[in-house]
Image (tube, grey):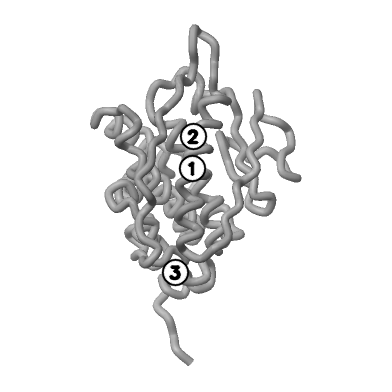
Amino acid sequence: MQVLPVALALAAAVAGGPAFPVQAGRLPAGACPEPAISAGGIPRTREYLAAVVKCLDKSWKAYVERAGRTFREPIVRYFEEPADRVCGGDWPAQAAAFYCVERRTLVFPLTGSWIEGRTDLYPFKVAAHEYGHHVQRLMGVRLPEAREGAARRRYELQADCLAGAFLGSVWGSLGRARADWEALLEAARAGGDDFDGVRSHGKGVTRVRWLERGYRAVSPSACDTWSAPASRVA
C-alpha cells in the first residue's frame, strides 16, 4: 500500500485531491466597480454586497464551468442584525459574514464593524472570502468537521487565496491605489489567529501570504493549501 506524505494525505482525505486544475487557467479579467457603501449618510450596505456578489457570480461561473464542474449561484441572505438562529443552527459566535455549506448560503449582516462606515476594501474581501467557500463546495473541497486545527486552517486559507485571485482579476476596475491594497493586507493581518486565540484561520502573516499569493497569480490553482508545508498554514 502506498503511504502518502502527511500533507498529501490531508489533501486526499479532506479536499478530495487537486480540486483546482492548472488547465482551468486564471480567473477572467473583469470589471467590478465598487458602489458607495453609504450615500448622503444613509447606509447602502445591501446594495454594496449585492453588487459584489453579482461580480463574483459572473467571474466564478466562467471558471467553474471551464474546470468541468456545474456552477450554481449561492443563496444570499441579508440580516439587519445577527439572528439567534440561521441555516438550521445557532448564529456562529464572533462571526461577521459566513457561508452555510450544506445550504449553499451566504449570510451577510448589514451592520457591525466589519462593514458599517468603512471606506477600505475589507467588506469586499470578506464577501470574496465567503464566496470562496461556495466555490470550494462546487469544486468538491469539503469542510473539515473540526472548527480548529490544521485541516480547518488549510480550508480557510484557501478561501483567502481564492479571494485574492478574484481581487486580482478585477483590480483594474476598482479605482483603488496601492495604499488601499496595503491597508487591506493590514486588515487581513489583524484578523489572524494570533489576535483572537482561536486556531482556525491562520496567523495574520499567513493569511496575508495566501491573500497575496492569489492576488498575484489570479489563478485558483495557486491556492493549493492542502499540499503546502505545515509552516505555510500555521
For this orientation, the residue located farthest to the left is 178
Count the numbered circles shown: 3
Between disc 1 and disc 3, whose residue precedes?
Answer: 3
Q: Is 83 situated above or below 201?
A: above
Pointer 2 residue? 52
Q: Report if residue 197 is visible in the image.
A: no
| Residue picked out by circle 1 | 56
Within-10-Å neighbours for mark 2: few <14, some 14–19, many 20+: many
Amino acid of disc 3: Pro
Kindly identify the residue that appears in the image at 56 percent across and 58 percent down.
Answer: 138
User: Disc 1 versus disc 3: distance between alpha carbons?
Assistant: 22 Å
Locate residue 103, reporting x and y percent. 69, 50
- Residue drawn 64% across the image and 31% down it: 78
- Residue that mark 3 sits on: 18
The residue carrying pointer 1 sits among few (fewer than 14), some (14 to 19) or many (20 or more) residues within 10 Å by Cα, namely many
Instruction: Name the kind of residue labelled 2 in the image.
Output: Val
| Amino acid type, mark 1 | Leu
Secondary structure beneath dot 2 equals helix
Q: Position of residue 187 (x, y in %)?
A: 37, 33
